[in-house]
Image: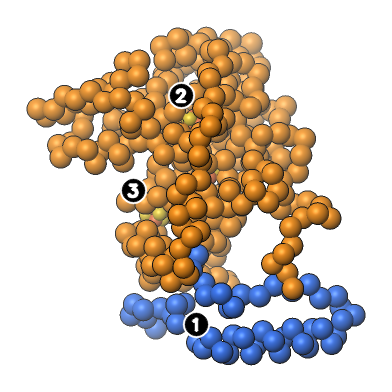
Chain colours: A blue, B orange
Amino acid sequence: MGIEPGRLHFSWISSAEANKFVDVVNEITAAVKALGPNENFLKTEARVA
Amino acid sequence: MLAYIDKIKEISNRLLKEGKVDMVIGFRKGTVPMMNEPCFVKTPEDVDNFVWDSNCGINLANYLTNRKEKIGIVAKGCDSRNIVTHVIENKIKRDQLVIIGVPCKGMIDRHKIEAMFETEIQDVIEADDKIIVKGQGLEKTLNKKDVLQDNCALCIHRNPVIHDELVGDPVEEQKDLDRYEDVRKIEFMSPEEKWRYFDDLLSTCIRCYACRNACPLCYCPTCFVDESRPQWVGKSQDPIDTRTFHFLRAYHCAGRCTDCGACERACPMGIKVRTFTRKLEKDCLELFDWEAGLTLEERPPLDTYRPDDPDDFIK
Ligand code: SF4
Ligand code: SF4
Ligand code: SF4
């Protein structure tokens, strides 16, 4: 649908894999920060209150 | 066509007289050309209202949701597949139904035909494979195959997949079609191109929800777009709200959509809304070898797990 590659991530982490969880979250936040704000999903038309 | 009509009337009459069903759901002639309407017949005297022609594109499975009566239902190939989906999803019981199957040769596309003429179309008559369009100072004969709905031109299940009665001999199924040329074109686009493509596609959408209302899959008591606590998606016509509506709706139809085309037919703006569901249809076929609504015996891919399910996208 035109979402930039790198903005959406999938991972399978068991509740016992704390380290993997931390790693994956760090990786994803870094990747998404590098892409910058998601301008595509900003509303462009006038907002009602 | 006439033979079909007689047969539909005859079967309906018999079912109602014998008390096998409380009502029969079929089509009656619409008040405007090319728009036949669903028709609920409860007494044998009323079966004469039934018609059949190439303007019966509405999916009648839509009218079965949560019904308690015993129902006779007229079903084309695609309706029958949505009936199967309804049964699988517990929206109706198989033994409540007498399915009157109609082998189908496709429905004509009212948007296409309307776009061909400047004058208002007052009457559309069918003779074999020809369609005669009439209006003020207008009379033109078209080939039916040139004005089929896009989904019908690509349909490979024209014969009802389940039925208790059949109104005519099975028709020949279309073979060797390249069903996904258009989807592949979009798949090859870059993310930016896709973004623009869908912006364009949806630019005229007025959020009337006719596409949703016509779809037999969309039976949620409260649709996510109507929910206000929490409000999942904005209700405005801002392009991003409209886009969110369409993509989410499509995903709700994943593995369930039969490509019946009722959504596209219903759209007053002529938006090709099947563009979304067809990508999912293609994925289900390629990844799970699944076509919706073909059998009562198997669970759909989104509610089963198989160890060999594709999972390359998961890290
Ligand atoms: S999708 Fe197939 S069964 Fe349904 S109306 Fe079109 S040709 Fe007939
Ligand atoms: S999404 Fe459209 S084509 Fe698919 S089942 Fe619903 S109405 Fe039919
Ligand atoms: S029917 Fe057409 S205009 Fe209405 S919400 Fe659906 S796509 Fe938009």
* Residue in the image at 46% along x and 57% along y: B186
Q: Is residue A13 left or right of residue B120?
A: right
Rendered image: mark on residue B270? 3
Question: B2 and A22: which one is in front?
Answer: A22
Q: Amino acid at mark 1?
A: Asn
Say which element carries label 1: loop
Closer to viewer: mark 3 or mark 2: 2
- Which residue type carries mark 3? Gly
Q: Between residues B112 and B238, which one lies in front from this camera angle?
A: B112
Q: Which mark is residue B198?
A: none
Ligand 3 neighbours mark 3 (CB distance < 8 Å): yes
Circles 1, 3 touching at the beta carbon (< 8 Å): no
Q: Quadrant of the C terminus of chain B?
A: bottom right
Q: CA distance from mark 3 to mark 2?
A: 22 Å
Examine the image and state in which quarter residue A22 appears: bottom right
- Residue at the location (30% across, 25% down)? B143
Q: Is residue A3 above or below residue B124?
A: below
Q: Residue at x 61, y 75 (%)?
A: A8
x and y percent of residue B106 in the render? 44, 28
Residue that badge 1 annotates: A38
The disc, 3 or 2, on the residue closer to the chain's N-terminal end is 2
Q: Nearer the viewer, mark 1 or mark 3?
A: 1
Determine the chain carrying the residue at label 2. Answer: B
Give the residue furthest to the left. B137
